[in-house]
Amino acid sequence: MTTPKRSTLMKLLFILIAISLAGCSNSFLEYEDSPYTKLDDERNETLALKNVRAAHPELEDAHININSFKGYVLILGQVSSEEHIGLATEVVDKMRNVKRVHNELIVAGPTSLISRANDSYLSGKVRTRLASSTDLQANRLKVVTENGVVYLMGVVTRQEADLAVEETRQVYGIQKIVKVFDYLN
């Protein structure tokens, strides 16, 4: 590679890294507006899943996803009995730093890998749509999809929630939209 090409490539790489880091810093700063940080939520997710799995032997192999956003916890997945749904809520609700638990577990067999891949695809499409909206701060929202159902989490105004739902409706392939918001007004 000649020197001018290498120099241009290095400049381009530097610009891409700078843009990436700027996006990360904005997201992190927005998160720090409250006493809950991204690290608190990651800890909540890890600890909640560990505690739920330890609560009953049949939950060890169940398909359970736990998502936390500023202390609001969303439990998704499939379990083998109604008793396990209540047990999961009870376990997570007792945790420190959990403001509210929204349990969407269902009694069913685990979803397929194809379904999970589609869920990831839908979440990405919704995130992209929300990020491109000039009227929303996408970093104040969290998008989670389970079995074609999109869950929107965040601490937002009612107007922002309505706008987020409207933007999400524009994404093809979504079965349903569930709002898991804490409203500022």
Image (spheres, rainbow, N blue to C red):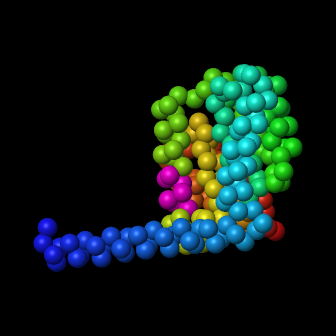
Q: Residue at x 72, y 31 (%)?
A: 53
Q: Is 116 in the magenta?
A: no
Q: Is residue 22 left or right of residue 84?
A: left
Q: Is residue 94 left or right of residue 13?
A: right
Q: Nearer the viewer, residue 4 or 65?
A: 4
Q: Is residue 149 left or right of residue 181?
A: left
Rendering coords of residue 111 (x, y %):
57, 29
Rendering coords of residue 6 (x, y %):
20, 72
Q: Quadrant of residue 48?
A: top right
Which image quadrant: the N terminus?
bottom left
Q: Nearer the viewer, residue 82 or 96?
A: 96
Does residue 120 sit above or below 182 in this rendering? above
Rendering coords of residue 123 (x, y %):
54, 49
Does residue 100 sit above or below 135 in this rendering? above
Q: Residue at x 33, y 70 (%)?
A: 13
Q: Quadrant of residue 59?
A: top right
Q: Nearer the viewer, residue 141 or 172?
A: 141
Which image quadrant: the C terminus?
bottom right
The answer to whether residue 27 is seen in the rendering is yes
Q: What secondary structure do most residues of the magenta stretch adopt? A: helix
Q: Is residue 47 left or right of residue 137?
A: right
The magenta span reads 124-130
